[in-house]
Image (cartoon, coloured by chain):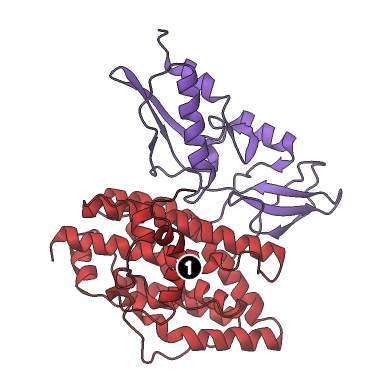
Chain colours: A purple, B red
């Protein structure tokens, strides 16, 4: 039986996409926190994006299925809450994929101190215009907000910045 | 009461607050006044039910009788739920729904902020995760409060009426009993008096900006934290538990 390395397993996980954002692998999303050998098996640790994210269960099952198909002996997937996931953990490749797919990637600002902070300017993923406005604080999933571009008129999702 | 019993009760209360409000908000699914609000309310419900999942799972572990989060959520009787009464009040209309959300979000925010420093590491981890979501909820409901309060005469009157009407349910949030006291002294739970001060200050600021008048402190309704609920609770549970009661152990 083949013996696996951490990097090989990570490469396999690159193939598993977030079911709600299919251009983002679970590795690019930053939710795979640890891949470590435990005795004769591997322990994979993940962290949820949002507490109620319905994709987490599917992602767990996909990881287990992938390991099964490749004869990797894996312990039940472990979920940790702390440190809490942040959009800073989305890789550069993941950000580019999001933009190409039509979802504006998270901007690196979030003002937690002020209650009514000025809205962050989100460039349109289609035409790059900064003349956009928030339509709703929630979009098609909990991790996104809904925007519209005033120049090309395209409605688009924004992957909210979470820190 | 042992420390472990108090911790079970304490975590269950926080979990039940999230669960029952999440259930209430989910009733708006398909009924929101506009599509964006329908989505926003149900996403908030999703966050709350997610938080309840973590909390009730942990409560089951503390109890040590093998109950998982689903059994905690769906197979308890009314007097075994310990959420504050505020969270089980009916949605009524959009003004009532937002008034309840606004008053609770500010409490929830300060509670989780304090829980970050809890001696109980799992509770602190849940707080760290939840605080990010609740920060967003609080901003949203506060902005809505200002939009409605400082909006038209109609919207102003209706949100003011809703706040006045449910105000008597806010006192329970800060009512410390034996469980709260034990948890606070153990460095696990929050100082409710401190949160009350922060809550009043912040709620006043937003209500001022919304041109609304904060009601006077008066008689407050209590009971939920001890499992004594309003007449609405049974109906919530009947709807929530129907599937598990009718078809035990059914899975989605």
Q: Is residue B30 visible?
A: yes
Q: At 18% from the left edge and 66% from the top edge, which residue is drawn? A: B182
B43 lies above or below A27: below
Q: Residue A25 placed where, x, y %? A: 58, 30
A147 lies above or below B159: above
Q: Residue B149 placed where, x, y %? A: 63, 82
Give the quarter of the figure containing the N terminus of chain A: top left
Count of labels shown? 1
Q: Nearer the viewer, residue A131 or B75?
A: B75
**B146 displayed left or right of B86:** right
Quadrant assignment, res A95: top right
Q: At 68% from the left edge and 32% from the top edge, which residue is drawn? A: A97
Q: Residue B108 placed where, x, y %? A: 42, 66
Q: Residue B45 placed where, x, y %? A: 52, 61
Quadrant assignment, res B110: bottom left
Q: At 54% from the left edge and 67% from the top edge, which residue is drawn? A: B25
Q: Which residue is under mark 1? A: B239
Q: At 43% from the left edge and 61% from the top edge, which residue is drawn? A: B246
Q: Is residue B113 visible?
A: no
B85 lies above or below B182: below
């Amino acid at each position: 039986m083949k013996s696996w390395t951490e990097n090989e397993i990570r490469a396999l996980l690159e193939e598993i996409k977030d079911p709600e954002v299919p251009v983002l692998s679970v590795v690019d999303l930053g939710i795979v926190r640890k891949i470590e050998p435990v005795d004769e098996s591997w322990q994979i640790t993940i962290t949820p994006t949002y507490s109620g994210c319905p994709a987490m269960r599917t992602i767990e099952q996909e990881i287990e299925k992938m390991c099964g198909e490749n004869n990797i002996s894996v312990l039940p997937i472990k979920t940790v809450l702390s440190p809490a996931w942040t959009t800073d953990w989305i890789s550069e490749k993941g950000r580019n994929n999001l933009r190409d797919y039509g979802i504006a990637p998270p901007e690196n600002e979030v003002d937690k101190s002020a209650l009514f902070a000025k809205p962050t300017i989100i460039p349109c993923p289609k035409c790059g215009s900064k003349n956009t406005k928030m339509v709703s604080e929630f979009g098609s999933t909990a991790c996104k907000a809904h925007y519209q571009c005033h120049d090309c008129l395209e409605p688009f999702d924004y992957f909210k910045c979470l820190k | 009461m042992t420390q472990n019993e108090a911790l079970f009760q304490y975590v269950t209360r926080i979990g039940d607050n999230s669960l029952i409000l999440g259930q209430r908000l989910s009733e708006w699914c398909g009924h929101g006044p506009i599509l964006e609000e329908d989505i926003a309310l149900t996403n908030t419900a999703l966050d709350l039910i997610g938080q309840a999942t973590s909390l009730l799972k942990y409560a089951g572990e503390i109890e040590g009788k093998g109950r998982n989060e689903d059994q905690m959520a769906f197979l308890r009787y009314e007097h075994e739920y310990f959420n504050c009464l505020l969270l089980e009040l009916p949605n009524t209309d959009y003004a009532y729904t937002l008034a309840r959300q606004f008053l609770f979000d500010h409490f929830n925010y300060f509670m989780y902020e304090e829980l970050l420093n809890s001696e109980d590491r799992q509770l602190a981890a849940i707080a760290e995760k939840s605080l990010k979501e609740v920060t967003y909820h609080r901003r949203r409901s506060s902005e809505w409060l200002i939009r409605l309060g400082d909006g038209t005469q109609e919207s102003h009157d209706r949100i003011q009426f809703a706040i006045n009407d449910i105000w008597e349910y806010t006192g329970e949030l800060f009512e410390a009993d034996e469980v709260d006291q034990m948890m606070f002294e153990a460095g696990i739970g929050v100082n409710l008096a401190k949160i009350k001060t922060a809550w009043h200050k912040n709620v006043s600021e937003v209500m001022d900006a919304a041109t609304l008048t904060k009601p006077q402190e008066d008689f407050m309704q209590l009971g939920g934290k001890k499992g004594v609920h309003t007449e609405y609770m049974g109906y919530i549970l009947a709807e929530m538990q129907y599937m598990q009661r009718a078809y035990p152990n059914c899975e989605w």
